[in-house]
Amino acid sequence: MINWAQFPDLAVSALLAWAFASVVRRSRGQDAGIWLIGWLMIVVHFAAFLFLPAPGIWGALAEIVGSAALTWAGILFMWATVSFRKEISSLWFVASLLLSHTLYLALLIAGPDWALIPAAIFIPAGPLAVGLVRMRKFNHPFRWVTISQYCALAVFLLVFQNRPGNGGTLAINAVLFNIYLGCCVHFIYRYRRATAGNFITITGFLAWAAVFLVAPVMQSYLPQAHIEGEVWNLPKYLVAVGMMLLMLEEQISHNKHLALHDDLTGLPNRRLYQDRLASAIERARRTGTRAAVLLIDLNAFKRVNDTLGHHVGDLLLQHVGTILAKRVRRSDTAARTGGDEFSVILEEPTSREDALHVSESLRRLISVPMQLGEHIVQIGASVGVAIFPEDATDLEALCIAADLRMYSAKHDAATKRENAAFPISLPPLAAPPPPQQRRSPPEMH
């Protein structure tokens, strides 16, 4: 027997998963791939529930698979929001949740009643064991919030799961309510921004969790009220729409970022650098203060590219970008303004002495040998410093002044390298002695 009433929901969820997959292919975030697996679990849930009316073990198996797929979807949605997902204990954590929930639902639907007590205890025991074992190497407060949530669920299950009549229904609804309320909490914690996608997703998860609370209450106290099954599934589709909006919002945000930042180093590009420099000059002019520009050119970068390859050259640029981003203040700007050229804007409070100190510090940091993959690379840098308003009073002239000083520093460095390559110098030739005048022989008298 097949429950054809579930077929429209199966068709809609399958089409929604297909649309979701098309959006995921264009998304850069790793969260989207896990979300897609979660939505495939929703499709499995509806597909399994088609066979609920099947007699005997087949109906029980369909209920186990359908209920487990619904819990797996929620757990995967939560795990996708975890920022420390690559930490090994995070994998153990989610694996213990998937295993314990599947085991509990299987025993609740088809197992003996005595096995429910250890199964309910096992739900928080696995995550708790992972948290305690890995506490010294990795500890995050939000992990303990999640463990506390599942401990509260276990207490509820131990109290109500063996209740005559509706104990099993209350237990299943409690498990699903806990999971999708957890999804709501995780999304609030991860996506702390006021966007339409975030609002719709969180609202959808909250409504999805409320279904497992409102439905049993209505069955107990308002049995005459009849609500179509499609109404209970609306929160699922609301969440799907919200997630797709979140992916589109992230893609738009990423495109805006690329328009103003260098894709390789993540630093501001020339366009954003010039905008910030113009603003810094205007602020300095208005307040009667100074601003400094540091133009940094990498020495021997072409030799690294030619001898070790462009991949190592890219690693070198990324390493230098990290050095600059960590060294400057938050009020300052470090940018990549050319192939191997970087620029830094120093705003007030600053002076020529400060700017020279920063330039020397950056030059020394860049000169330290770098481990780039299998290679150790050592390069240098030439830095030109220009101060507003002492060296120039407008953006273009200030950049030209910094550029000229950078080339002067590069020429001086090249001269030093040439002298270092030929340390033996010959003394200047001595002037030849003046020719001696011949004495005329004495005259004979």
Image (tube, grey):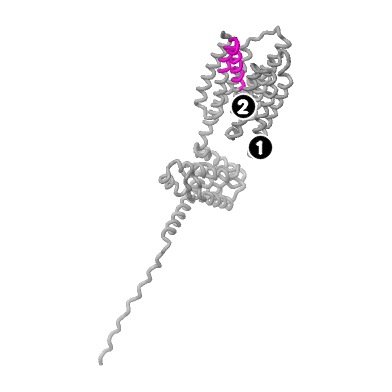
Q: Determine the secondary structure under disc 2.
A: helix
Q: Could you tell me residue 393's position as x and y percent? A: 54, 46
- Above/below status of 346 relative to 76: below
What residue lies at 71% left-to-right and 16% top-to-bottom? 167
| Residue 155 falls inside the magenta stretch | no
Is the N terminus in the top left, top right, bottom left or bottom right quadrant? Answer: top right
Q: Which residue is mark 2?
A: 78
Callout 1: 10 Å neighbours few (<14), some, many (20+)?
few
- Lower sequence index among marks 2 and 1: 2
Q: Residue furthest top?
A: 224
Q: Nearer the viewer, residue 379 or 373?
A: 373
Of 80 and 320, nearer the camera is 80
Based on the picture, tell me whether residue 49 belongs to the magenta stretch: yes
Look at the magenta stretch and give its main secondary structure.
helix
Looking at the rendered structure, the secondary structure element under dot 1 is loop
Q: Position of residue 301 (x, y in %)?
A: 45, 46
Give the label, 2 or 1, closer to the camera.
Answer: 1
Q: Position of residue 268 (x, y in %)?
A: 53, 39
Q: Give the camera-side residue of 331 and 392.
A: 331
> Which region is colored magenta?
44-71
Q: Can the viewer see residue 167? A: yes
Q: Residues within 10 Å of mark 2 (few under 14, many from 20)?
A: many
Identity, as a three-letter code, of the amino acid under mark 2: Met
